[in-house]
Amino acid sequence: MIDRWERAVPVFNVPIWTKPFKALLGLGTVAVIITLYREVAGLGPVSGMNDAYAWGIWKTFNVMTLTGLGSGAFAIGISAWLFKKSKLHSVMRIALLTSFLAYLSGLILIGIDVGRPWNIIWLFTPWNWNPHSPLLEVMFCMPAYAMLPLFLENVPPVLEYFHRYKPETRQFVEKCERIMVKFYPFIVALAYILPAMHQSSLGALMLLGGDRVHGLWQSPFLPLLYVWAAAFLGVCCVAGTLLFCSLMWKRPYDMDVLVELNRLGAWLIGTWSLFRLLDLIISGRIKLAFALDIYAGLFWMEMAFLLVALYMLIDSAKMRDARLMFHAHVLVGVGGLLYRFNPTTLAFQAKPGAFYFPSALELLISLGFVALAIAGFSLAVKLLAILPAPNALWFQMEAREESMNKLHQRGVPVNDAAPSFTD
């Protein structure tokens, strides 16, 4: 029998408070405590940044790199709605959740990096803005994307939860849904425009870096390449997460949808790689790839990860092999993240002689907020209808809840009740 993803169903048959979940929260708590120390002590004692190199991993990894992984909602949304890839509608909720958490994590980290939260007042004084800086566009588009379309598009599963488990809130929930329906076309439009603007601005930022960025990554097409790379990174992040969740929680997967995601990812990676190589060849910078130095090695490492992943994506789609698909998406993630990380850090020279290496506290903050994002994902998919599944799984969940309610009414202790916000 072939499984079809027909509706979203929570992960109802596993507890919320598992050991990995507690470990993620512990790592996040450590990061929050260090963040409080950073706010009091300043950047110097906490980070490896200095006056010559004021460009640390909170910007280059958590913002420049991880928001690429969080672009699944942007890429899959365009494919599903504009290019009529109707099968992909079934994975929109997980795409929206991973995107929201990745962007929220990045926003928090850039807030920690900038510090001085009271300076937010300058946001409301347009006469002090620098209209010539790409960062102005990033400053507006990134928070607006996370807090408007991504946040609002993640609201329906929460409303569904309250409508199902809190009958006293149903009137309010239905009113909220009617309001959202009216504004939904505008929300969707913003969800396409804002990430395209700010991802291209990140590329434009590195373009302004000039010769501080190594020639293998410097290109007048950087804004386009950044948006393009974000698209395939986001698609593969969503596909890899779906496969990981199916493996972890033994949920059925819809091979037709996974093959569609594979094809989309393969097309984006193939065309992106071809365009990038042609750009290097036509500009004459391809000779740098054959120099005997670390930068040539990093370049070929990126290309090797992505081209091997491209072959595996095509092959796994033909064979309908879920394990091979998962490995391919992991390789895409490594190769794509290297492409976003290299020009901002490893192949970036702020000033002659400038050196930067992240401190242990800096790394703990970076990893801690990533851990909190993963914990947030784990919690959300157990409480809310996010992950796609066949209708049969929904009926299993309802039968289980009904059985537990009967036991509860008889006074039989039920230790593993249906997940709720109050557990």
Image: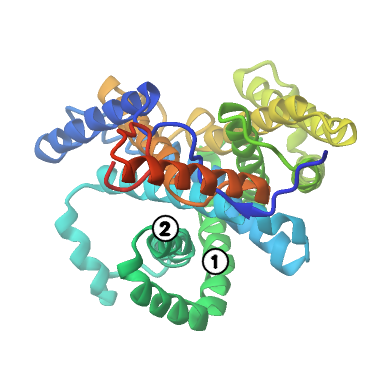
Residue 202, visible in the rendered structure: yes
Question: Which of the labelled discs sits on residue 374, or is there none?
Answer: none
User: Where does the image place residue 104, in percent across and percent down from the top left?
Assistant: 38, 50
Q: Is residue 408 above or below residue 296?
A: below
Ranked by sequence position, the earlier of labels 1 and 2 is 2
Residue neighbourhood size for the residue with mark 1, other residues' Cα within 10 Å, grouped as few (<14), some (14–19), many (≥20): many
User: Where does the image place residue 347, in percent across and percent down from the top left?
Assistant: 54, 30
From the viewer's perspective, tell me whether residue 360 is left or right of residue 295: left
Q: In what element is the residue under mark 1?
A: helix
| Residue in view at x 68 percent, y 37 percent | 252
Q: Which corner quadrant of the image does residue 32 belong to?
A: top left
Residue 381, visible in the rendered structure: no
- Mark closer to the observer (1, 2): 2
Nearest the camera: 131 or 160? Answer: 160
| Residue in view at x 37 percent, y 26 percent | 18
Q: Amino acid at mark 2?
A: Tyr
Quarter the C terminus occupies: top left
Q: Which corner quadrant of the image does residue 340 belong to?
A: top right
User: Where does the image place residue 65, in percent across and percent down from the top left?
Assistant: 51, 40
Nearest the camera: 114 or 375? Answer: 375
User: Where does the image place residue 272, in percent across and percent down from the top left?
Assistant: 75, 46
Residue that mark 1 sits on: 191
Residue neighbourhood size for the residue with mark 2, other residues' Cα within 10 Å, grouped as few (<14), some (14–19), many (≥20): some
Q: CA distance from mark 1 to mark 2?
A: 24 Å
Nearest the camera: 181 or 218? Answer: 181
